Amino acid sequence: MDERIDPDELLAAVGFDADESVLTRRQAEVLALREHDIRQSDIGELLGTSRANISSIERNARENVEKARQTVAFANTLTAPVCVDIEAGTDIYDIPPTVYAACDEAGVEVNYGSSNLLQLIDDAVDGAIQQDTVQVPLRIDVTNDGVVHVRGQSAERTE
């Protein structure tokens, strides 16, 4: 391990503030060190704990980051001017024109071409698309600046 790497310096360089983060300071330290390709066992030595504990801290940190991403996506969709619900069983090639029409109606320019939009959907919701068909109900929201958020939704959703 590079002895010059100091977790405090790494966190200071990126402006980490534990009071403003969903991560604990220790979680942030572990993620920052892992992003610098430091092995868990070396991080454990540096921080005075076991590799198993570092593994647990890293796993929890990554889960917290994903929850934060989902929360931000949810918050963004609350104010999104374009909201399109796609039913399970929909042909995937019907999705882009539906989204584009809703965006045109709202005066929003979407930042994705058809193939990129379909790839975004497939990447965002595991198992959403199989054999050119939507497998689960989807919610596609487009923000004022054209950013697309895709979430799977429960079939029991009520208005």
Image (spheres, rainbow, N blue to C red):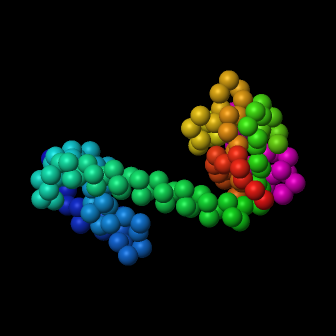
Please state the horizontal and vertical placement of residue 131, each as a whole percent of the image.
68, 23
Residue 129 appears in which quarter of the rendering? top right
User: Residue 59 appears at what percent x and percent y?
Assistant: 33, 50
Q: Main secondary structure of the magenta part?
A: helix
Quarter of the picture holding the C terminus: bottom right
In the displayed structure, 119 sits above or below 111; it is above
Quarter residue 73 falls in? bottom right
What range is drawn magenta here?
99-117
Please state which of residues 75 and 117 is positioned toward the viewer in this rendering: 75
Is 99 on the left or on the right of 61, as rendered? Answer: right
Q: Can you name the residue that lies furthest to the bottom here?
A: 19
Residue at the spot 62% in from the left edge and 64% down from the top edge: 75
| Magenta highlight on residue 113 | yes
Q: Single out the residue that lies furthest toward the top.
A: 131
Residue at the image point whose x is 81% and y is 34% from the top: 94
x, y (%) of residue 24?
Answer: 32, 66
